[in-house]
Image (cartoon, rainbow, N blue to C red):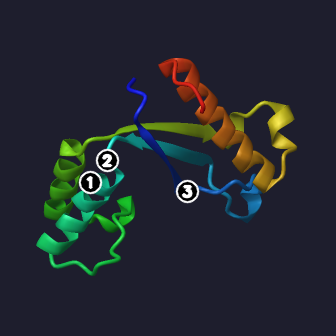
Amino acid sequence: MPDNLTFIFAGDEAGDASKNFEKGASRYFVVAVVATRDADGLRSVLADLRHSENLVQNYEFHFNSLTSARLREKTMTAIHNADFTAWALIVDKTSMPYALRDLDGMEFYLHCVVELINRILWNTGAKVR
């Protein structure tokens, strides 16, 4: 992996860090990291799509909001052609080790972020500078 990648943490995780399933907590928690050589270029991919599709400037491309097959296809094509690498950690909170079940929401969230970053570093050989 080249040394000149800019890492951007995707702070808009999926699910929630709570484990209170009786009160509606999600079963899965997902965190993601995106790496790119050109952060502005990556941002412009979706900005250009918003413009070409006459969407508001701050339109967010959430999975559940892509109900239009045409917009979903255009979004996936734009993302497919963009220059980035992504990693995600998906946690099934119902099958976690007991030690993790005792973590509060923020502790669990941070544990997942650190775990993902450690896995990226381990699998890519990248170094933290």
The residue beneath circle 1 is: 41
Report x, y in % for residue 71: 18, 63
Locate residue 35 relative to residue 18 in the image: left or right: left
Report x, y in % for residue 115: 66, 33
Whole-number angstrom distance, CA of label 2 to CA of label 3: 19 Å
* Circle 3 SS class: strand
The residue beneath circle 3 is: 11
Q: Residues within 10 Å of mark 3 (few under 14, many from 20)?
A: few
Q: Quadrant of the N terminus?
A: top left
The residue beneath circle 2 is: 38
Q: Residue at x 23, y 45 (%)?
A: 82
Figure quadrant of residue 75: bottom left
Which residue type carries mark 3? Gly
Between residues 72 and 126, which one lies in front from this camera angle?
126
Whole-number angstrom distance, CA of label 3 to CA of label 1: 19 Å
Q: Residue at x 78, y 30 (%)?
A: 97
